[in-house]
């Protein structure tokens, strides 16, 4: 029996009040799960229109086949006990591919009940693309799509005061709401739109900065048969997630009345400043994830659990967290003991026996992730300690090796922006493996300001340290290179 509205007897269609850019595992196992809770337990009464952000997406057709229904299976430690539980999420009412249904996408703007926008297009998603134009063709970037929709709404409702939206992005970049708004305004300038539209964006729309936290490995390839028996039906869109979650939203006080998370008993914090929460989480949890992936994967491991429980890699990642990341976090709002407590919880979450979080699922857009998650810790450590953090530097070298696209005889399926993949492909294609060739390759990579937002070759000793580690990894292999470290 396949999950759909015919087989799910409690199926309900809600008013379409939320527009969601992204259909991936995280949004479904985090945002949609919480919207479903608010609908069922707090009378939120809000359906979601899901927009496919990428032209090559493959999830939307499966969602449509199941009428937007899917199962979230939560597995982990809850109130001191190992617990597994599952629930059907019933809040997605429509799925739109804007690349082939652009008119239908723009028509969403005309819905008077639309109130919220949420998104997760990865760290590389909130960008300005000057090639996006205001026309009858779908913009490629997420901000371009949103700008086009907001302009359509502005025109249709003639700039009415009460037709603005609350935008709650979930991308893991600092001040994500503010940056998204700034890009929307840049598109207004690029497209030569009316000044009244810019005023409407500023005055009638609310852009919230956020922090999101839940490990969502996604579809359980390894044990889907076991899960199908447990839930009693076939679901091609099952999402596995941990029990722990946290959503911090920086916004106005009136948002609590419109967004009834507290009434639903959810771990959502509406705050005046998201910064302390974001710094702690992004640098420790996400930074550890990103630093772990290339080293553990090249070592021959495939999941976070395997890696953190491994004798060598487990000690490596713990040393990065406690010896390099935490010492780089100087913040009067977060006491040192609280950082250690959070780090201990992170290690326990990584060890969750129920979750098989594949390293390759974290590897998407690894360059942008290293730049936002790990580079700040690396730079701050140097500033405070006056020396390089050896293990973060080693992870950086391993990441460059990872983008060679080979693990032994196995091809690595790299997933990143096309210009990043092409950049690395050309560099590795012209590298013969000699120390001089690797030296030139590293200098080119560290000097790429488009990726790092700065020239990393200017950091004293960093280039030579990355070269030394990469030479060892390339010539001796990751295991021997780690021993030398």
Image (cartoon, grey):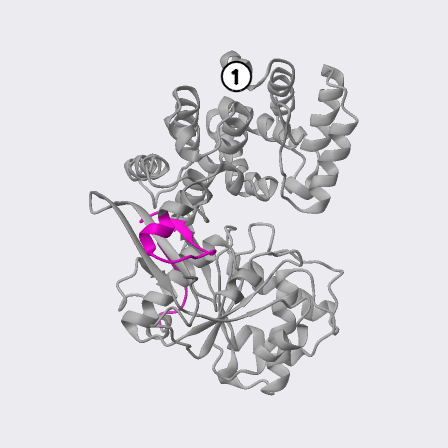
Left or right for 376, reference 148? left
Residue 366, located in which quarter of the rendered image?
A: top right
Q: Is residue 427 above or below residue 311?
A: below
Which residue is found at the position 38% from the left and 75% from the top? 12
Q: Under tag 1, what secondary structure?
A: helix
Which residue is found at the position 55% from the left and 73% from the top? 202
Q: Quadrant of the N terminus?
A: bottom left
Q: Is residue 115 above or below residue 171?
A: below
Residue 236 at x, y = what percent?
47, 55
Graded by Cα atoms within 10 Å as few (under 14), some (14 to 19) or many (20 or more), the crowding at tag 1 reads: some
Judge whether residue 247 is colored magenta.
Answer: yes
Residue 343, located in which quarter of the rendered image?
A: top left
Which residue is found at the position 58% from the left and 26% from the top? 398
Q: Is residue 358 above or below residue 479?
A: below
Give, as a single range, the part of the protein colored magenta: 227-253
Q: Is residue 244 visible?
A: no
Judge whether residue 103 is colored magenta.
Answer: no
Count of all numbered marks drawn on residues in the image: 1
The residue to which callout 1 is attached is 479
Which residue is found at the position 33% from the left and 38% from the top? 352
Residue 263, located in which quarter of the rendered image?
A: bottom left
Residue 48 at x, y = what percent?
47, 70
Left or right for 16, reference 242? right
């Amino acid at each position: 029996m396949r999950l759909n509205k015919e087989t799910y007897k409690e199926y309900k269609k809600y008013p379409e009040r939320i527009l969601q850019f992204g259909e991936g595992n995280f949004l479904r196992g985090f945002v949609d799960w919480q919207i479903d809770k608010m609908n069922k337990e707090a009378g939120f009464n809000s359906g979601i229109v899901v927009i496919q952000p990428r032209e090559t997406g493959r999830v939307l057709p499966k969602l449509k086949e199941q009428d937007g229904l899917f199962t979230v299976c939560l597995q982990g430690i809850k109130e001191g006990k190992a617990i597994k539980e599952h629930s059907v999420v019933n809040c997605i009412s429509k799925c739109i591919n804007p690349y082939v249904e652009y008119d239908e996408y723009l028509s969403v703007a005309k819905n008077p009940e639309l109130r919220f926008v949420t998104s997760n297009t990865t760290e590389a998603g909130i960008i300005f693309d000057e090639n996006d134009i205001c026309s009858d063709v779908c913009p490629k970037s997420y901000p371009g799509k949103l700008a086009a929709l907001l302009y359509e709404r502005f025109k249709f409702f003639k700039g009415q005061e009460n037709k603005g939206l609350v935008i709650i992005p979930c991308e893991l970049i600092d001040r994500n709401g503010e940056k998204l708004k700034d890009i929307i305004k840049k598109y207004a300038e690029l497209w030569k739109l009316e000044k009244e539209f810019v005023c409407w964006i500023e005055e009638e729309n609310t852009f919230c900065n956020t922090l999101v936290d839940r490990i969502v490995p996604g579809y359980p390839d390894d044990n889907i048969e076991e899960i199908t028996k447990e839930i009693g039906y076939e679901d091609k869109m099952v999402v596995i997630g941990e029990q722990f979650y946290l959503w911090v939203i920086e916004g106005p006080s009136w948002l609590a009345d419109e967004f009834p998370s507290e009434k639903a008993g959810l771990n959502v914090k509406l705050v005046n400043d998201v910064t302390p929460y974001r710094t702690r989480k992004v640098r420790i949890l996400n930074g550890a994830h990103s630093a772990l992936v290339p080293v553990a994967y090249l070592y021959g491991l495939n999941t976070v659990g395997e890696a953190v429980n491994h004798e060598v890699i487990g000690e490596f990642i713990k040393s990065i967290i406690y010896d390099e990341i935490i010492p780089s976090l100087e913040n009067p709002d977060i006491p040192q003991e609280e950082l250690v407590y959070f780090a201990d919880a992170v290690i326990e979450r990584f060890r969750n026996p129920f979750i098989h979080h594949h390293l390759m699922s974290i590897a998407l857009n690894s360059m942008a992730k290293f730049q936002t998650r790990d580079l700040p810790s690396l730079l701050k450590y140097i500033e405070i300690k006056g020396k390089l953090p050896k293990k973060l530097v080693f992870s950086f070298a391993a990441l460059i090796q990872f983008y060679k696209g080979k693990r032994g005889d196995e091809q690595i399926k790299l997933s990143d922006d096309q210009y990043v993949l092409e950049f690395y492909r050309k560099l590795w294609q012209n590298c013969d493996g000699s120390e001089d060739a690797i030296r030139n390759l590293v200098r080119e990579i560290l000097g790429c300001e488009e990726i790092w937002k700065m020239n990393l070759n200017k950091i004293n000793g960093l280039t030579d340290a990355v070269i030394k580690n990469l030479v060892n990894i390339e010539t001796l292999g990751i295991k021997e290179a780690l021993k030398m470290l």
